[in-house]
Amino acid sequence: MQNKIEYHLADMTDILGLEVDTLKGLSSAPKYLLSKYFYDDTGSSIFQEITKMPGYYLTRSEQEIFENQKEQITDSIIPDNPRFDLLELGSGDGSKTKVLLKQLVQKRSDFKYIPVDISPKANSDLESELKKEIPSLQISPLTGDFFALKNSGNISSNTRKVILFLGSNIGNFTEPEIDLFFTQLYDLCRKGDKILIGFDLKKSPEIIMNAYNDTSGLTRKFNLNHLARLNRELEADFDLSKFEHHTTYNPVSGYLKSYLISREAQTVTIKSLGHRFVFSRWEPLFMELSRKFDLPSIERIASGHGFSVEKNFTDQKNWFADSLWVRT
Ligand code: SAH
Ligand code: AVI
């Protein structure tokens, strides 16, 4: 029997929205912007270019895990092969997910794939590509903030769920966001449901720094595009040449932090907010956290939120882990 779709697009609005979040972030000390707003159409395509950079090992490491262990992964995520919903949060271009989707289709698994992404273009590109590449796949994309999934009120499906959260998207969360995210996932899941989460692992700081400090300037462009987006969408007047990109890595916390630093004292006007923001010379604007993890911290996050780690799938270099959790 065809399963009724219980997930609705219309309710999935952004939690506060670009305007309110920008006003909050630029009025704070220190100033910050939220990294989820990197992904307008331009930002999503710059991110896809980043994933192909020689130094950005994250995507290749996770791809290797999926290519080499696809049978074990798909057998473990849904061992008894009942009908299930496969939700993917922050799916992007789904390039790695395709490996698992093809394997599941080959196993004749009965499932619907529900990619959830804040970027409408990422979702529509993914849908049309998958319809061509895997015609038998049932797919129902949702566009919106995955933190709003629960607010949609339509997510209480009785169908078994497997949730994918790949690419070390979790590294972009602060500690309170991790708490909120997994509390929501706990409520969304039933006992026995599983989640597969990609974690970028701690490694040589030089390798980590190279992934975000590329000489090609692509990561710098990705960060500056956030300011360009504010110019386009909120009638701001950021002069991009007056900001420089800077990253730091703390091997104790595993926190890789990205900033744009104001090269000079300047005032930026954001017309649609009716506000002016004063930057002093060398003032940092915090753009993104890309946290790196170790296996004990993964265990702690799982057990602290009502999940247990069933298995960690790692690449040969042990640079990345896809951790399979079961809801207890
Ligand atoms: N999982 C993919 C894409 C990673 S890029 C991969 O591993 O390559 C991060 C993706 O998450 C982007 O497509 C972005 O649009 C999406 N995203 C970021 N924050 C989000 C949020 N709060 N809600 C929904 N999608 C989000
Ligand atoms: C999506 N996310 C996991 C990427 C990361 O590595 O933190 C985003 C990114 N930022 C700069 N480069 C890539």
Image (cartoon, grey):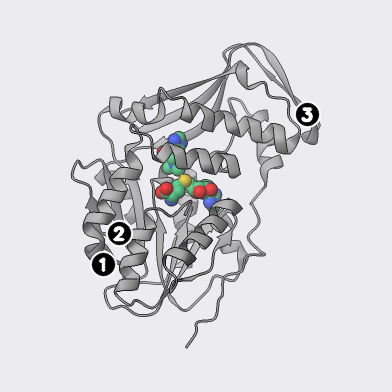
Q: CA distance from mark 2 to mark 1?
A: 8 Å
Residue to which mark 2 is pinned: 324
Considering only order in the chain, which callout, 1 or 2, is on the residue closer to the N terminus? 1
The reply to whether discs 2 and 1 touch (Cβ–Cβ < 8 Å) is yes
Q: Which numbered mark, 1 or 3, is in the foreground of this view?
A: 1
Considering only order in the chain, which callout, 3 or 1, is on the residue closer to the N terminus? 1
Secondary structure type for disc 1: helix
Quadrant of residue 76 in the image? bottom left
Q: Is residue 315 visible?
A: yes
Image height of 77 relative to 305, above or below: below
Image height of 106 relative to 264, above or below: below
Image height of 31 relative to 118, above or below: above
The residue type indicated by label 3 comes to His
The residue type indicated by label 1 comes to Ser
Residue 160: x and y, percent? 41, 75
Residue 283: x and y, percent? 58, 17
Quadrant of residue 60 in the image? top left
Residue 278: x and y, percent? 70, 19
Alpha-carbon neighbours of circle 1 within 10 Å: few (<14), some, or many (≥20)?
A: some
Alpha-carbon neighbours of circle 3 within 10 Å: few (<14), some, or many (≥20)?
A: some
Residue to which mark 3 is pinned: 275
Residue to which mark 1 is pinned: 76
The residue type indicated by label 2 comes to Leu
Tell me which residue sits at (40%, 53%) in the image.
95
Tell me which residue sits at (25%, 33%) in the image.
203
